[in-house]
Amino acid sequence: MANQKKTEELAPVTGGYGYLQTVDLAGMMSGELDGMTITFDRVKIPRDGVLFEMPGDDEDTPDVAKEFTGVILYHHLIRGYYKTAYTGGNNPPDCGSLDGHVGVGVPGGNCHECEWAKFGTAQNGFGKACREHRRLYILREGEVFPVLCSIPAGSIDAFNRFAIRQKSKMGSVSEIVTRFSLKKAKSKKGGLDFSQVVFSEDRPLTPEEKTGLLKYAEDVRQLAAAVSLQDRTGTSQGVIVEMDEEDDPF
């Protein structure tokens, strides 16, 4: 009976996100995974389609999904400017920003006053030469590491409205499970077809889940904040966070 009681005490919390009460992300990074290069898997959004490309066991044959759910632990705006069109590889942008406010490189400085952050400066004449994405760190149920999903310019307004709705309910996107899906849309200028992300609330988190997510989300924020723009794959504390390669048409 004594052995049975000990087993019950050590059993992890199950169901939903309750298991995070037993997860120490910072401890994992400095302990068992110390010295390893850990990459966050990515959820990719098609240029024109309604299926997400999901991370799977085989990189050559990724999974696809019409929708998925997860908790948005953290999100921030990123910017990237290439003087000449990006053609692939790991070359860094001429100027980039991982906080959406201050650019590093040439021209650098205040992003909000930069000429390349204005509409009409892109090569197609419609969007901005300095591309904008909002990077989401999403934790899917049953997993320990979040996945990255970079929301392109055509979906940023939809995300902003969704986040503001949660704030109006005296909450935040990190306190609910979000459902992600795609719909086809057309740009107001140029009439370009693109895939737009649809955000909806799947369910609120339970008090137990919120407790487990609180410290975990803070660990993710610290990892994200420490990433540099020294090269196209900013590396910090063993975690690689890639800059976005999508050629955003807007």
Image: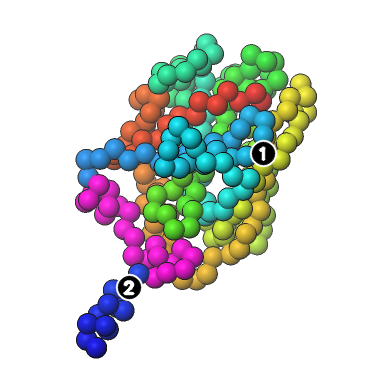
Q: Are marks 2 and 1 in contact (CB under 8 Å)?
A: no
> Is 113 drawn above or below residue 239 in the view shown?
above
Residue nearest the viewer, comparing 27 with 76? 27
> Is 162 positioned to the left or the right of 103 in the image?
right
> Is 187 positioned to the left or the right of 66 in the image?
right
The secondary element bearing badge 2 is classed as loop
**Quadrant of residue 227 in the image?**
top left
The secondary element bearing badge 1 is classed as loop
Q: Position of residue 53 (x, y in %)?
A: 55, 38
Amino acid identity at mark 1: Val
Q: Which mark is residue 169?
A: none
The residue at which mark 2 appears reads as 11
The residue at which mark 1 appears reads as 50
> Is 32 drawn above or below residue 117 in the view shown?
below
Q: Could you tell me if residue 237 is visible in this image?
A: yes
Query: Label 1 crowding class (10 Å Cα cut-off): few <14, some 14-19, many 20+?
Result: many
> Is 177 positioned to the left or the right of 148 in the image?
right
Residue nearest the viewer, comparing 59 with 91? 59
Amino acid identity at mark 2: Ala
Q: Which residues are magenta?
A: 13-33
Residue nearest the viewer, comparing 8 with 129? 8
Q: Quadrant of the N terminus?
A: bottom left
Specify the color scheme.
Answer: rainbow
Q: Position of residue 99 (x, y in %)?
A: 48, 36
> Is 71 drawn above or below residue 17 in the view shown?
above
Residue at 31 percent of width and 37 percent of height: 236
Q: Earlier in the sequence, mark 2 or mark 1?
A: 2
Q: Quadrant of the C terminus?
A: top right
